[in-house]
Amino acid sequence: MNVQNHRQHSTQGQADGFAPSEAGMNALLGIAGKQLGTDPQRLKAQLEGGQITEALKGLDPQKSAQINQILQNPQQLEKLLNSPQVKSLLNTLMKQK
């Protein structure tokens, strides 16, 4: 995955006012950490360091491949981020304090 492009997209979303609160981000990291079988703070450090592959090691290979495929395809990632379910989840996480 091109981490630079993903970070650019993430930063652009924050500039548009679409950034989760700290509590929302911690909740999301907690959920993801549980699914991946890793500590949320370790997961955060891996993601911030661009170690996406390392962060996904806790998933079964099929799910990991699906996520990598989406992350490598800007159109698929955009479609996912614009889905009603993801927008609803992000809105909920952004409202948490």
Image: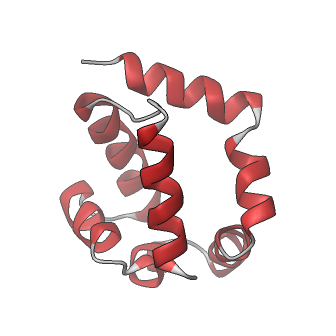
Q: Residue at x 40, y 83 (%)?
A: 54
Q: Relative to residue 39, is residue 63 drawn left or right? A: right
What is the tally of numbered marks visible in this picture? 0
- The image quarter containing residue 49 is bottom left
Give coordinates of residue 40: x percent, y percent.
26, 55
- The image quarter containing residue 51 is bottom left
Give coordinates of residue 21: x percent, y percent.
30, 29
State which quarter of the image contains the N terminus: bottom right
Q: Relative to residue 17, is residue 44 drawn left or right? A: left
Q: Relative to residue 65, is residue 9 drawn left or right? A: left
Near-viewer residue (55 or 15): 15
- The image quarter containing residue 52 is bottom left
Q: Residue at x 67, y 69 (%)?
A: 63
Near-viewer residue (70 or 12): 12
Task: Identify the image's colour scheme: rainbow, by chain, secondary structure or one colour.
Answer: secondary structure
Near-viewer residue (92 or 32): 92
Q: Relative to residue 1, is residue 43 drawn left or right? A: left
In this picture, is 83 found above or below 4? Answer: above
Q: Residue at x 48, y 20 (%)?
A: 92
In this picture, is 84 found above or below 35? Answer: above
In this picture, is 77 found above or below 73? Answer: above
State which quarter of the image contains the C terminus: top left
Give coordinates of residue 85: x percent, y percent.
70, 30
Q: Residue at x 79, y 49 (%)?
A: 79
In this picture, is 12 found above or below 71? Answer: above
